[in-house]
Image (cartoon, rainbow, N blue to C red):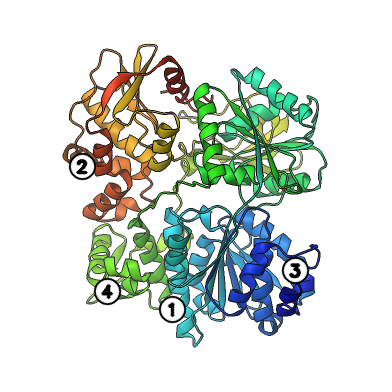
Amino acid sequence: MSDLRARLPRTWYAFLARHPRPRPVQVLAAEPILAGSAVLLASATASGKTEAYAAPLVERWLEDLRAGVTRILVVSPTRALVNDLARRLEIPLRRCGVRVQRRTGDHPKPLEGSQAGVLLTTPESLDSLLSRHARHLGAVRAVVLDELHVLEGNARGDQLRILLERLERVVQALGGPAPQRLAATATLGRVAEVARQFLGAGAVLAQVESARDLQMHIQTVEGPGLLQTRLLQACTDLSARKVLAFVPSRADAEDLAVALSGRPPFHSAVRVHHGSLSRQERERVEQTLLRAEAALCLTTPTLEVGIDVGDVDLVVLLGPPPDVTSFLQRIGRGNRRTGACQVLALARSVGEAARFAHLAECARAGRLLAPARPFRSSVLVQQTFSLLFQNPHRLVTGSALSGRLPSDLASRFGPERCEELLAHLCDQDWLVPAGTGRFGPSPRLFQLFEKGKIHHNLDAEGSDQDRVEVVDEQTGRLLGHVHRDSQGNLPEEISLGGHRRRIVADHGRQIRSRAAGEGRAEFRSRGSAEISAELAADLARHLGIDPKRLPTARKGGRLLVGHFLGSARARLLREALRDSVGAGAGAGPFLAWLPIQAEWPEKLDEASLRRLLLRRRRSLARSLGAGPWAGSVPGDWLMEDLEALADPRGTAQVLAGRTLAPADPDLAEILVGLLPSWTSEPEP
């Protein structure tokens, strides 16, 4: 401790003195951060990573930070995490004489004249800043990627990699050195590879293995009434006063909150947290949980990472998370005082119970089964638009775009290939020619820029036309939003924030409501969570399935076939089955289903799957996660991305030579239980 205190003479008291001794990750990270190295901090939830990077960074740049020069930039995945980080950093930074500022869609205050030494933002707001106010970032000397595991492997992570290169170019163009890069994560597979992608070659790994004890109780329940009873009884039996319960969907959270409110042991202290609540309502819930001694919060993954809600006695999982990383994040929210994770896993079938047991096995063994995901070329469409408006002359060239890419991407997308993309975007009416090799914005693109719609790589959730704000009739407070049904209607009564509400006025884009009545809100589905091919295959191993067999079971008039391909490959199999068998066939990440009388297709080779992918490329692009701008990339580029995502070769290899064989009774029961079972996810 004395060595670390000596290295941090001006920031020790502000950031670390309140703890009896420094955490291991804080000791490991300090020296390389102070030396200016790129560092990836990897350790468990609540292990002190924020202080581990903040204290040495502030120590290193304290004079400039006190002078109001923005030297430290922290990029966090969500606005909620930015808000939580600001709350946690404000007091120690104030003790050091340093100001902190948030820059997000919720806090759009301009940077000019802010005198903030530390800036907290999201990838989308960083994109906007580079596009509109790049010079204000010229003084940045360190950039921190907080909760990197949330962004790695998706289109937003692809975007962030390019934004880091663009930021570096801006800083160097204004006479500064390339900013020091750091990242923090609690659960991340392929640590060395991810560090190289985001931080560059030679990044230092400050990695601490978790030693928390997992105390997991798996119970299989059937029907919502028994589930509610088991949940409340377990809280009483385990003397759990503050409970965080993760549920599959917003509708499940609302329904359970209404059903559990008023019942012991929590009575009125039942809360709901999900993305359809307004920012003010979510923050109110977070602050209530932080202060409460006893409460039950039903949440979607919005509370999976980062946000501090105080010490949680028990984590409840209603249905298994999609992967080991998510599982570790959720259970890591529990009982941080003792180092023991007290977890109640409620499964609605023996199939879900088997998945819980498998996830726990992987967690204990440290097998994250994290897949390597390809770069999505659709991100280059969005970055073309953003880079174009960063140029004062509103122009972009192929060489400029290629020159802002990380080295591994620049070798794949050189100037000539980027010029091909720009020409294609002209044909799509996004760009207009502006001289040899130069392109400007079309009126269509300029309009999107003016509305701030070009800075994201988030898939839209439902349409804006059917999204409706819900406000309280008496106070006018915005509570959140719901969606109209396919006919444009709303029920007379809804539940939102765990409370029943009656709609008293419908003004089109906004409804007024009062507390009363019963009903459930209409929410747009975010789609099913992705199950990786690696995790699905490992579940088959865990269940003892013969790799030369496709186990089968029967349910009603359907034949269930256990393929364990994972979500992306299963989407390709689903299309092949529907072509061969008809509309009664389908496939999920573990199982396919078809009518009893139908025949399993004989021809599922690589060539036929590639042809199928080519025919359905536009419809499959969104479900495979090709990114919201995938419709604007050249057709052959899209096929490259989809082949990397759906993997027709790997799919064919897994299925080749495997024969259908009836499962034994125990395995057959598990297969049936792996079908979707939650009320918000209709059974296929």
Q: Look at label 2 and name its amino acid.
A: Arg
Q: Residues within 10 Å of mark 4 (few under 14, many from 20)?
A: some
Q: Nearer the viewer, residue 477 or 497?
A: 497
Task: Please indicate whether residue 23 sits to the left or right of residue 452 in the image.
Answer: right
Cβ atoms under marks 2 and 3 closer than 8 Å: no
Q: Determine which residue is flagged by label 4.
A: 434
Distance CA(mark 1)–CA(mark 3): 32 Å
Q: Residue 244: name its quadrant.
A: top right
Distance CA(mark 2)–CA(mark 3): 55 Å
Distance CA(mark 4)–CA(mark 2): 38 Å
Q: Secondary structure at mark 1?
A: helix
Of marks 2 and 3, which one's residue comes earlier in the chain? 3
Residue at image point 30% right, 16% down: 595
Q: Secondary structure at mark 3?
A: helix
Q: Determine which residue is flagged by label 3.
A: 15
Of marks 1 and 2, which one's residue comes earlier in the chain? 1
Q: Residue 384, how many percent across, how many down?
A: 36, 66
* Disc assigned to residue 610: 2
Q: Determine which residue is flagged by label 1.
A: 169
Q: Secondary structure at mark 4?
A: loop
Q: Look at label 1 and name its amino acid.
A: Arg
Q: Nearer the viewer, residue 603 or 586?
A: 603
Distance CA(mark 3)–CA(mark 4): 53 Å
- Give the foreground label among 1 and 4: 1
Q: Residues within 10 Å of mark 3 (few under 14, many from 20)?
A: many
Q: Look at label 4 and name its amino acid.
A: Ala
On screen, residue 577 above or below 149: above
- Give the foreground label among 3 and 4: 3
Q: Secondary structure at mark 2?
A: helix
Quadrant of the image for the N terminus? bottom right
Q: How many marks?
A: 4
